[in-house]
Amino acid sequence: MSFRTTTAIDYVEDVSPGSGALPPRAWYAASDATSLSLNGSWRLRVSPTADAEDDSFAEPGFDAGNWAEVTVPGHWVLQGEGAFGLPIYTNHLYPFPVDPPHVPTENPTGDHIRVFDLPEDWPSDGGAVIRFDGVESCARVWLNGTDIGEFKGSRLPHEFAVGHLLKPAGNVLAVRVHQWSAGSYLEDQDQWWLPGIFRDVTLLHRPAGSALDFFVHASYDHRTGEGTLRVDSDVDGRVSVPALDIDVETGETVTVRVDPWTAETPKLYDGVLVTEGERVPLRIGFRTVVLEDGLIKVNGKPLLFKGVNRHEWHPEKGRALDLETMREDVLLMKRHNLNAVRTSHYPPHPAFLDLCDEYGLWVIDECDLETHGFTEQAWRDNPVDDDRWTPALLDRAARMVERDKNHPSVVVWSLGNEAGTGRGLTAMAEWIHGRDSSRLVHYEGDWNCRDTDVYSRMYANHGEVEQIGKELDGGTHKRRELPFILCEYGHAMGNGPGGIADYQELFEKYERLQGGFIWEWIDHGVTHPELGYAYGGDFGEELHDGNFVCDGLIFPDRTPSPGLLEFKKVIEPVSFEGADGTVRVTNKQDFAGLSAFAFEWSYQVDGESVESGSLSVPALAPGESADVKLPEPPAQSPAGAETQWTVRALLAADTDWAPQGHEVAWGEVPVAARSLPSVAATDGPVAGDGVITLGPASFDARTGALKTIGGVEVSGLRLDVWRATTDNDEGAEWLTGVRCAEQWRKYGLHRMRHRLASVELDDDALTVRTRVAPAAWEFGLATVYRWTSDGSRLRLTVSVGPEGEWPVPLPRLGVRFGLTRADAVKWYGGGPGEGYPDTKAASRVGRWESTVDGLQTPYLRPQENGARADVRWAELGGLRIEGDPEFFLTARRWTTEQLDAATHLTDLTPGETVWVNLDHALHGIGTGSCGPGVLPPYQLHAGPAEFSFVFSEIPENSEIVDVS
Ligand code: IPT
């Protein structure tokens, strides 16, 4: 029996990167050398501390027969239904005492065993390497009882030479993985803490004379149209690229005419690197990245990043993504007009970068480094400013750069995220600049740009971004010379992000602003048997940051959220603006012409297309515009009809990311406005026994409350100003620190009282006067409901007059009421998805159909959602409702109060009543959950307002009622 001493686990708290691993090198998926995937089922034993068990499990002959089984790649806390421990979510707080480099004694440790035979055809010559593509957070490895080393750097590859240890059969690979290590201090990213061997494990045969490291230098000269290729290789060999007639020695430079690589035109040339012992396939993209005239230019042209921050996430597998999931991400990005990804906040699985090369996405490849939790102690003891940690930082930089340097998609290296400033970062930047002069270096945390080639910020508000665009922001001399990007903006938590169209306008207006990256791609919800999707706190964590981990443009199942559809519209590659029968078409791409697109027009009368055809648009270079004449409007439209053109750009042919006909851009050109509904007040209210009737409606005689419209029962119709607060409402607005939701609650907007002042019957109207106000405060809304009818239709005019000093904006202003039956919903107005004042770029005017359930947007933490904007009329529950003016329509099977109280979607149970909100106005959405709040034009301030709805019973419905 061996005896454990404390020194046997010293490596866990050692700040050095590890020992025994081979130098980092270029990563490639496949060559003609044999390899063996060690993914699959492994044996697992989880211990509560790093030293609970001795090393004997690594000995050949150890019987792990009674251990659990676990899938590699995977995280043990996401397997075994909690038997192996649970996930923990914190944003920037370390979930352990900040006591670097020490970690808690309670350090879940997973001993993994995999027994494998070599395949029959495994060559007997040469060596072998075992490669771990990702293990969180620290591992010690034994093969056949021999300790081959230990490593940290969770999302970086580590290789070990093992040829001398292999036997034909019964090889025992033992890996001890510790959840916490000194490395955890460098990996404080805002995400779940998920220990495990979560990326591939591969045994690679290394034939004699096989390739080691190699660096593909492939540049493009936009003046000559020529590409220059040189492949530097540690092992000499030849490089051939058949399509370019290239066949040269490694290290030799060759210049030929090429088609360049860009994210819009991702031309890759297949090549091969042949060394004495190996043939390595190459996919070469020629492009040149420079900083010139204070701009990031590729192939001579400035770029505009339309990007997103991507964490790796799968609701069941965590960060253990399969190739199909990665491809799905890339396809979704391409189909939604994105052109860039920041790999927040670590290098992704390497196959993801292959996909970016192939489909075309600009990549900011970020190192696995974040020490954000040190901000709580004013960055004292920050590892990036402590020389003892510098070797670990340099190791991480080298492992990223060496692994990913042959990807044309990678145009910028990022040192990491939210790690303050310090000498270690400078050392990383110097090393990267020295190793790879063909790309730029990014790091957001240093606003002086001491080490970087681009001025980068996160969540700066529109005003500041505009100042930066105008170069009025000051800063160091160096910074003033640099281009600007928002490496994070548009925090996509819950409903939102709002205001991204306003950012895009700035990006397009000022040359220095080279775009940005929405935070973030996907909600990190974890599939949960009772909660649907779990978020922070749902696993009983003692410290957590709740649903701040759910802030993506797609839901955990990868369904696009309204935010992604909005972003797609805001960043479309072609824009259309029109008036008077002409549409101005602009090519908003940076490199490509319009030949990939086919253009169509259609003409709508009251939202229905009556005619369509193709539109011929002249060839336009990037940035160019042309005025294109639309055809003569088709046949005379009925009087009072609303008419408009819709112009669309579609893919002219199948691409590898979307089929022919896929829509990339659209625009609307209004022609004639609709005539607003009018109701002649020919009927008058009649008082009966406890009831007042007016046209098709009946009211409670005492309260004036609406009861029925024809056969349709209506309950609780009254003014409504409250909404189930969104994550953005709950957040602290960055500039002012104001928490909108907190203010709303303080002033009682969620508990408004309605005092009835009078019910008045006139010849032509029923008028109900009320005052709507919260307990404890003197401000309020004098609210008058005026009902008129022409006998069959019922018109409600609501007049609202604020009284007193209103200290806060209103969440909403409109009426709400309950219907006993409603399912199908039809409307003419904005759709098909939700739209709020600052998130409705993607909402297009048309005739739409859905159901009450179909109107809901399933934000993981329930909140205000699902409003359809600019609605002219709607039909549901047997009623037709016309708006004067247009309104926002919301309908749900629960009340706003129930929605507000729910913490997970599973809390929402449909009731008997469908609650409908018809809003004259809504407060915007903003991105206050992390960033600026609602911009002034989208704020809803209490002011005098008047708006009307015309109700009528839909004839079909009266028939049903008659029968019953
Ligand atoms: C910023 C982080 O970089 C990112 O990882 C994420 O946490 C995001 O915020 C919020 O979701 S840091 C913050 C201080 C702006």
Image (cartoon, grey):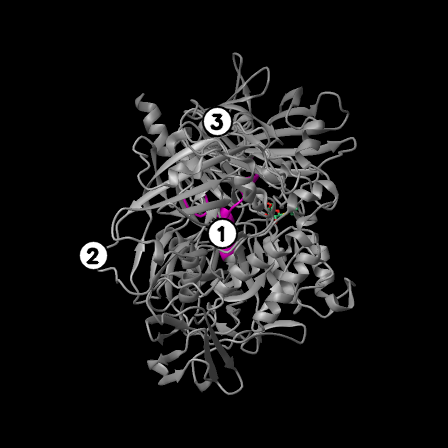
* Residue at the spot of label 2: 120
Residue at coordinates 64% horizontally, 50% vertically from top-left? 418
Say whether disc 2 or disc 1 marks the residue closer to the N-terminus. 2
Query: How dense is the environment of label 2, judged by Cα within 10 Å: few (below 14), some, or many (20 and up)?
Result: few
Quarter of the image holding residue 786? top right
Is residue 93 shown above or below 267? above
Nearest to the observer: residue 346 or residue 754: 346
Query: How dense is the environment of label 3, judged by Cα within 10 Å: few (below 14), some, or many (20 and up)?
Result: some
Visible residue check, residue 618: no
Visible residue check, residue 28: yes
Picture coordinates of residue 188, whole percent (x, y): 59, 44
SS at mark 1 in the image: loop
Give the Cα distance between marks 2 and 3. Answer: 64 Å
Magenta segment, which residues? 547-568
Residue at coordinates 38% horizontally, 32% vertically from top-left? 80
Pick the quarter of the image with the N terminus. top left
**Residue 877 as seen in the image, left or right of residue 152:** left
Picture coordinates of residue 736, whole percent (x, y): 75, 43
Camera-near label (3 vs 1) is 1
* Residue at the spot of label 1: 155
SS at mark 2 in the image: loop
Say whether disc 3 or disc 1 marks the residue closer to the N-terminus. 1
* Residue at the spot of label 3: 894
The amino acid sitting under disc 1 is: Arg
Q: Is residue 960 magenta?
A: no
Say whether disc 2 or disc 3 marks the residue closer to the N-terminus. 2
**Residue 396 as seen in the image, left or right of residue 482:** left
